Image (tube, grey):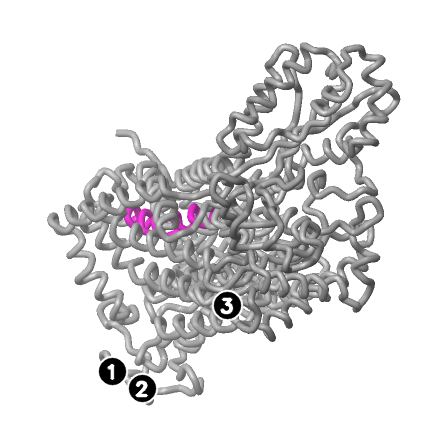
Amino acid sequence: MAKCKTDCIERPLSLAFEKLGCAVGRYPYVFLLFSLAVAAALGPGFFFLKDREANDIEDQFTPVNGPAKMEREIVEKNFPPSEEFSQLRLSSEGTYASLIFTNSCGKNIYTVAAFNDIIELDRQVKNITKGDTFKNLCAKTKGNCTSNPILDIINYNASAIVSSNITYPTNNGVFLGTAIGRVELKSSSSEISSAKAVRLFYFLDEQMTANNSEWLDDFLELLSNYTRENKNKNEVNVSYFTSVSRQKELESNSNSIIPLFSIAYFLAITISILSCSRLDCVRTKVWVAAFGVVSAGLAVLASFGLLLYCGMPFAMTIATAPFLILGVGVDDMFIMISCWQNTEVDKAVEVRLAETYKEAGVSITITTLTDVLAFYIGLLTPFRSVQSFCMYTSTALLFCYIFNITFFGACLAFNGRREKDNRHWLTCMRVPVASGDGKGCCVGGAFDEDTRKEFEMPMDSFFRNYYGPFLTRVWVKVLVCLIYAGYLAVSIYGCFQIQEGLDLKHLAVDGSYVADYYDKEDEFFSDFGPNVMLVIKDERFQYWNTTARDSLDLCLKKFQNLTMVDPDIPPISWLREYWNASNVDNEAQFKSNLTAFLNHSGFIQDVNFTDNQIHASRMFVQTVNIRTAIDEKNMLNAFRETAGECGNLQPPVKLTAYHPAFIYFDQYAVIFTNTIQNVVVATGAMLVISLLLIPNPLCSFWVTFSIASVIVGVTGFMALWDVSLDSVSMINLVICIGFSVDFSAHISYAFVSSEHSSANKKAVEAISKLGYPIVQGAVSTIAGVVVLAAAESYIFRTFFKIMFLVILFGAVHGIAFIPVFLAFFGTCGNYCEKSKQTFPKCSDSSLKSFSTQSVWSTDPDCP
């Protein structure tokens, strides 16, 4: 049979790493100083951090080219801001402050005592004297500050709340649905008998930007003091909010985890040292483990500094990246230490490091390539927060890889020289060589006389002698398959329970006044949703034509028939009012009277009528019962679909549905499809890399299977753990792709590299080599992010939850599921006969004369 080679890339890459290891072992100072110089040169990029911060919520957490942003451009182009303020007609949220009043224990707030407190706090707000006054800054209508309708109705007289017969949801044409919440009506009447909440708004003129900001800060200070001083004293409880609150709370989010990074760094160093420690005072790897963590820190310093130099925006989500890099860097360190310990101790340091690099180089290259590529694919997402995270993290992973094979390799070489001279790990003083497996503080350097290698770590012995043979028993394999079937069933069930969308209150820290306001808003003011704007942008639409008007009426009726639209509140339509006022179907007559009607009726802002041409007009439809993210998604889709149907009428009514909240609802339109796209593309890329670097095509497919399995598991279990699919969790699913490769690739590569003929023996060898490093890597990575579980932010806790699931499921696949599947399908062995060519090794004699030659010498005795 003809030979077939599937390692045409892997073998020369191994040779290249062998030469590199030889060079690092010979000249560790060069590589150490090179790494430190790079970090020192790029680190000062952090001075630009403040300038590069990008925490604008709309810019970072909504789709870059979301349809609502284009719809907003249409609105702003055709209906520019007017001096006459109208909350209904805002193209953005506006600049405002808001108060929600509730009574203790959910009691009726529709009382004289409650309204006395409401009116008093309203007076204090309007009398804020720091900076400019509310009267000078307020948004005005007909020269007066825009007021709150419920207070206007009772004329700021609390006793009138009982005597006034106020109807709901409209009172004399004024809509009260957003001002009074949880209303109960008198029997057989639309009059209010009781209510649970009252909301007030204080809108500011958006042209007064600088002064507005100062006034809003003073408002927040006033309410913070008021709620603290009057807690449980007044008749009412107060929740407060401003248009800048979300932004301020988001910017304070990053500061909340800065103290946690030092804790994570301490945990990573501690776990690394403990897992690499030995009782032998020479063979212990205390300093190596510590400098492995330092290597990851240098990678973060250099990579972030480089991107900050280059002007890359720094989003708040990137604050989680150092925790991730810390875990990844330590993972690769464990692989290299494991390979070092499998070399013969009496060989020269250069030879041992060359063998270490040859063994570990390809493995960590595979995982680095897959991780980096997975994150670069994440740049395809339409969310800037995800793009920034992926760019910073992928670059940091690349630097982590470079520092591992330069800085950490040099540290390993120095440590090897210390071990070669049998020096104490702490004092660096020579100690007597231990005999047999002798241990103690005064002797050291013991090794296995038979294999000439270091004694196995206890955990390595456990995986080789106990866990591996146990896992390959037939009944255990069957049990593992049954456990996997249960895992898959629960995961698939969870996938169908997942919710979409980022709740904006999650951008604030726990216990924030923002979260409290949103909770009260959801509880008391969800009966009525947004008043959606319907914009007719067709200049050819003949408003005066009876047939065209019938088509428009049919279109509006389609909207009124939607389940999320209130059928009892007719659309606000300038055309209907104009038609009722002057029943004309002649174009000239229609246009000649239009300007006077618009000025008189108050609809002047709803029609763009210039040069005797109607360029655009708008109407409004009131929605109801928009309580959950699913309701928001359904409403957005229903309005856009209905707008599309109106375009198919005869004559067509080409209109756009818009509300400022649609900017945030747009995430529902892309989050699911974009996540699927990223997962599919990244998985395909992982398959290609695996096919190129793992010398067995079938095992590459097992790696791909592992990716899909872990993604399904993480997605399903995150839904069961109350994590929604949003721009934050999308980041973590991208991570999932790269990390699920790490564990399965290590095991698969070790399996196919084994020279045993039995599939069971191959599996045992792979587990014995990499079982402990995988556990070390998993524990260290989880230790790197576990501190985020204590973060006071949903974003960072979500990062921890998904990272925990990714690492847990990835590790279980690596040390349980994949070895069993590989052992079941023994054909995944190295069935293609490898080339018998062997690469020359570094000999001791050649290395002695190596100092006078180039690092990349062609000496036949040295790679």
Between the C-alphas of marks 2 and 1, the distance is 8 Å
What is the residue that sits farthest to the right in this orientation? Answer: 611
Depth check: 401 or 508 in front? Answer: 508
Depth check: 665 or 763 in front? Answer: 665
The boundaries of the magenta stretch are: 734-753
- Image quadrant holding the C terminus, namely bottom left
Disc 1 on helix, strand or loop? Answer: loop
| Number of other residues with Cα within 10 Å of mark 3, as a class: few under 14, some 14 to 19, many 20 or more | many
Residue 738 inside the magenta-drawn segment: yes
Depth check: 630 or 666 in front? Answer: 630
Q: Amino acid at mark 2?
A: Val
Q: Residue 349: x and y, percent?
A: 42, 69
Query: Residue at 22% of width from left, 79% of height from top?
Result: 436
Between the C-alphas of marks 3 and 1, the distance is 29 Å
Q: Where is 534 relative to 172, above or below?
A: above
Where residue 227 sits, quadrant-wise, is bottom right
Query: Residue at 84% of width from left, 57% of height from top?
Result: 136
| Number of other residues with Cα within 10 Å of mark 2, as a class: few under 14, some 14 to 19, many 20 or more | many
For residue 438, which numbered disc appears in the image? 1
The answer to whether 43 appears left or right of 760 in the picture is: right
Q: Amino acid at mark 1?
A: Gly
Disc 3 on helix, strand or loop? Answer: helix
What is the residue that sits farthest to the bottom in this orientation? Answer: 442
Query: Residue at 72% of width from left, 21% of height from top?
Result: 580
